[in-house]
Amino acid sequence: MKTLVIEPGLAERHYWRDLWRYRELFYVLAWRDISVRYKQTIIGLAWALIRPFLTMIVFSVIFGQIAKLPTEGTAPYSLMVFAGLLPWQFFSTALSESSNSLIGNANLISKVYFPRLIVPTAAVVVSFVDFLISFVILIGLMIYYQFLPGWQILTLPLFVIMAFLASLGPGLYITALNVKYRDFRYIIPFIVQIGLYVSPVGFSSLVVPEQWRLLYSLNPVVGVIDGFRWAVLGGQTPIDWNAFMISWGVIVFFLCLGIRQFRKMEKSFADLI
């Protein structure tokens, strides 16, 4: 016969252990969101391919053909753009989904106890599925342009993890505030829209003047995109390691800030939501 012990602060001390105990709920939430996203849609999985492909064409025409911005190394401009677009799309989608994840699961949060950190993390994983689907286009472009990546492609998972953490930190912070202040849901589309043009998606970081490089590096996505391109384009993209480390520092800062804010407000989620 098992004995149930009710002790103040017990759940708090076992919080991180509970994340592992409730891993099946994590799988269920992630799979549910994936099913909902692609089930009963006209385009279905094709949308994850069409959206980045059309964006790549627009950026290639505007920045490559009209603005005549340079590519990196011998890589075709379209390939360089798409190598930057993939991590940006992962970041922006994950940030948007995780920021609204608690509101979207209000019924579950108000009725059942589990570590709430599971919800926004599962939302980021769902965005990773979109990333994997879009990665098919990158492989197709490499075959079309007969572009063979170097050994640097083996480091690609590192930059995917970097993009994961870059989106999770701000996502945790904003989704926690979004429960109490619903106006925050209007901030994310604005951040994503502005961020697309201040991040090196349609252009190379090489075109940024040296006097603006420090300020430019405070954007955590810069290190993600530059590293991703370096891995995909076989090292033809020079990495500014000082800027890269600054990006990592900003990512870690926002991740710690996001977790701290989330844990601080977590006890009030069920009442506020």
Image (cartoon, helix red, strand yellow):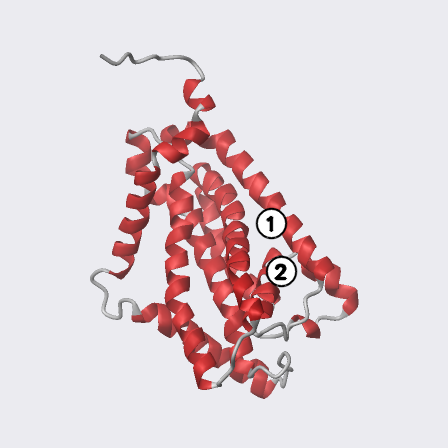
| Relative depth, front residue between 3 and 210 | 3
- What residue is shown at x 34% (from left), y 42% (from top)? 26
Badge 1 amino acid? Ile
Residue 5: % across, % down? 34, 12
- What residue is shown at x 49% (from left), y 54% (from top)? 188
Residue 122: % across, % down? 38, 46
Give the Cα separation between the discs numbered 2 and 1. Answer: 10 Å
| Relative depth, front residue between 116 and 184 | 116
Whether residue 27 is situated above or below residue 107 in the rendered picture: below
User: Pointer 1: what residue?
Assistant: 251
Mark 2 touching mark 1, by CB under 8 A? yes
The reply to whether residue 193 is in sight is no
- For the C terminus, the quadrant is top left
Q: Residues within 10 Å of mark 2 (few under 14, many from 20)?
A: many
Picture quadrant of residue 7? top left
Looking at the image, residue 192 sits to the left or right of residue 35; the answer is right
* Disc marking residue 156: none
Give the SS element for disc 1.
Answer: helix
* Disc marking residue 223: 2
N-term-proximal mark, 2 vs 1: 2
Residue 11: % across, % down? 41, 22
Picture quadrant of residue 197? bottom right
Badge 2 amino acid? Gly
